[in-house]
Amino acid sequence: MTKMGVCDVGTPLTKEQLVQIQTLASAGVSQREISKRLNIHKNTVWKHMSDPNFRPNLAEVREATKRVNAVKVRENVEKVHRVISDKLDKSDAFGAKAATGALKDLDQIQAVACGDEAQAGVAAAPSPVDLKVLIAQLTGSQSEGFAGLPEKYQPRGGDPSLGA
Amino acid sequence: MAATLPSERDLGLLAARVDSLSEPDRGVLYRGLVDAAKDRAAHDGLFWLRFVLTRDEADAHHSVKPFPLYLDYLRELWGVLADRQRVVCAKSRQMLISWCVAAFCVWWARHKENQAIFWQAQQARDAINMVCAAKGAPMGRCQFIEANLPVWMRQTLSPLEGRLVYPNGSFIQALPGGAGQIRGNVPSIYVGDEFAHQEEQRGVYTAVAPLIQKGSKAIFISTPNGSDNMFAELYHGRPVGVSASEGL
């Protein structure tokens, strides 16, 4: 069946069209949308995407896309890193605390973007430092970043209304 | 149900043993502590306040500070806010009353579902500055509190100018002054900021009062502005100059 402007189902696709299908499919574009964009019949798109030889290629394209994206994210994160590090050098204790937190967040964003699951979630595999920081937050004994403040700002230990 | 948070003594002992724990054990402990802390923060506001930071524009050296839990009156105010439905608070400036009420609204919104919290000030700009500012502008107070909570406690919020929307369906909305602004809404919590300086105070109170009977909270905070206004009447429990027996 032929529609106006739509290729026949049986028409072989060019190499360029196959690459375009792979690229769009790896970006998560639906088969219907690919058919529309490339002006190829949807059955042809389905036929090629269900071809067992096509699938490994699709996985390769996805990996390649992920690598390219990861490089871009890493570059951008590094730029932001540099800006924050500069500020860190010049800032006071509070600015330093905020900047250190921001750097840590950026590391996490980068790890997630790059698919680095080991580093991605602090909760998944917290370092001893992460765990100590959490315990310090829970006990109210975290003084890092607030060193310049009077002691009264630190929650009082042993106060029944403040903690167990 | 999350486990109970260990006592401070036990947490201290855990901290000393952290280095000897294996990676999986650290993960289990971390998640357990976070769950227990979130669970406790949901019903213990003073515990949650430990993680709240405030911004003090007047202090050039230490502009960000932990919430001053050492101030007894703020802890007492928190208890009143949690227990009472109608709160009238006359204050002077720089007492952190507004910060305390903003923190209370944030705590309420993030821990209770589908709550509508309205923060009304005479000028829309003032209300927006208390709730959530536009992208690129300095953060509103509620927004600042959320943004500075520990990473493990943060939520994905939808910040819009004058409105902070929570994933649980609750929101905090800034409103300009006027009885008409609040009349069509059904607040879970109404905050009248600098209420003594608002126009149409009586109209606002008339719109809010029936909701107090239904279970809503109404919080009126203000620096005093003489005795001839609704705020003074609410504060004293009767019009100024009228004896208690003839009061409201």
Image (cartoon, rainbow, N blue to C red):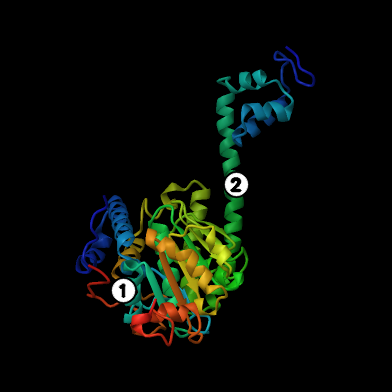
Decide: is B49 above or below A52. Answer: below
Decide: is A22 above or below A119. Answer: above
- Given residues A23 and B178, the one toward you in this image is B178
Residue bearing the label numbered 2: A69
Output the chain of dot 2. Answer: A
Dot 1 crowding, Cα within 10 Å, few <14, some 14–19, many 20+ = some
- Circle 1: residue type: Ser
Output the chain of dot 1. Answer: A
The quarter of the picture where the N terminus of chain A appears is top right
Q: Residue at x 70, y 15 (%)?
A: A9
Q: Residue furthest front?
A: B246
Q: Which of marks 2 and 1 is nearer the N terminus?
A: 2
Dot 2 crowding, Cα within 10 Å, few <14, some 14–19, many 20+ = some
Q: Residue furthest right?
A: A4
The quarter of the picture where the C terminus of chain A appears is bottom left
Q: Which residue is drawn at 45% across and 73% down?
A: B220
Mark seen at residue A141: 1
Q: Which residue is drawn at 24% across and 54% down?
A: B3
